[in-house]
Amino acid sequence: MHYETAPAKINLTLDTLFKREDNYHEVSMVMTTVDLNDQLSFEKRSDDKIIIETENQYVPNDRKNLAYQAAALMMETYNIKTGVNIVIDKNIPIAAGLAGGSSDAAATFRGMNKLYGLERPLDELADLSAQLGSDIPFCVYGRTALCTGRGEEVKLLPKPTNAWVILAKPSIGVSTKTIYSHLEPGKHEPASGKVVEAALAGDYDGVIRHMKNDLEEVTVRHYPEVKKLIQNMEASGADKAMMSGSGPTVFGLVQKERQAIHVYNSMRGCCNEVYRVRLLG
Ligand code: ATP
């Protein structure tokens, strides 16, 4: 039996640069991880099947699950004949902009690497994982990084800052594909370079001053409640509040625990799914 933790990610930036010939958007994103985790366990089987178990009724337990796809790709790539039971204890909200499915897939690449004693380096697993989704290579490392291309080119960064993160998820699911289809790329000034600079200098104020997500205005146009949450979070004392990924989850950063408790309690008054966690980095 082997266990892995799969943390949620947040975007400190999401620059959409242009639409490519392959229809993906060229992006530049500074992403980091927070202490809100799915837990996965991996156990070898006596046959060659991949079995996914999860109690969450909204998470598929067949080949649609990204963890299943990761396990299948590992078996095929490394010629593994012994199957695996994967139990996913789901805590990351689904379709939330927190890369929950991608993080489960990434944990599966790491978990199977250990379970079968493959000893493949993370760089190799990250390259392999890009076949399944743009955010998965970032999740394989599970650290702060600048991600470019369609998100799959990962350059690791040091932890940008110590901070508390308050997450508020409105009770709507947002499709990343739909949000990108309404986007006009290249309209905004890219912010990632400035956030990387501030992160490298350990400059909290610089990070929060330059944080920006180009998808926010698109999601807000379709779901005005997201804008309201951002405003409420800043009014209740967050140093900066912003949407993660394509949304709808909004997160706020603060430095002091007392301030974090205050923002958390205020947000509980206007949103029924709120978390107070540490930035992992
Ligand atoms: P991203 O931020 O990468 O866009 P997300 O947080 O918006 O991700 P996910 O929670 O990863 O979205 O899930 C989106 C869809 O993927 C779900 O509706 C679900 O059907 C499918 N899915 C596949 N595997 C998983 C998994 N292990 N956990 C959750 N959802 C999964």
Image (cartoon, rainbow, N blue to C red):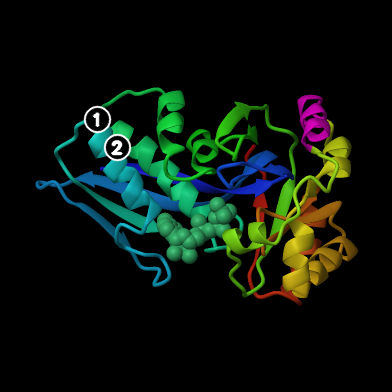
Which residue is identified by label 2?
74
The residue under the point 51% across, 54% down is 100
Element assignment for label 2: helix
The residue under the point 82% across, 71% down is 228
Q: Quarter holding the C terminus?
A: top right
Q: Quarter holding the N terminus?
A: top left
Can the viewer see residue 233 in this picture? yes
Position of residue 186 measured from the top left corner of the image (x, y, whole percent): 79, 45
| Residue 204: quadrant of the picture | top right
The verdict on residue 87 being magenta is no
Query: Against 117, is 115 above or below?
Result: below
Q: Is residue 54 left or right of residue 155?
A: left
Question: Depth check: 13 or 15 in front?
Answer: 15
Question: Where does the magenta region start and end?
Answer: 192-202
Q: Residues within 10 Å of mark 2 (few under 14, many from 20)?
A: many
Which residue is identified by label 1?
78
Position of residue 157 measured from the top left corner of the image (x, y, whole percent): 66, 27
Label 2 amino acid? Met
The residue under the point 73% across, 72% down is 222
Q: Is residue 257 left or right of residue 9?
A: right
Position of residue 278 measured from the top left corner of the image (x, y, whole percent): 66, 47
Label 1 amino acid? Tyr
The residue under the point 53% across, 47% down is 7
Q: Residue furthest left?
A: 46
Say if mark 1 contacts mark 2, CB within 8 Å. Answer: yes
Q: CA distance from mark 1 to mark 2?
A: 6 Å
Element assignment for label 1: loop
Q: Is residue 161 left or right of residue 99?
A: right
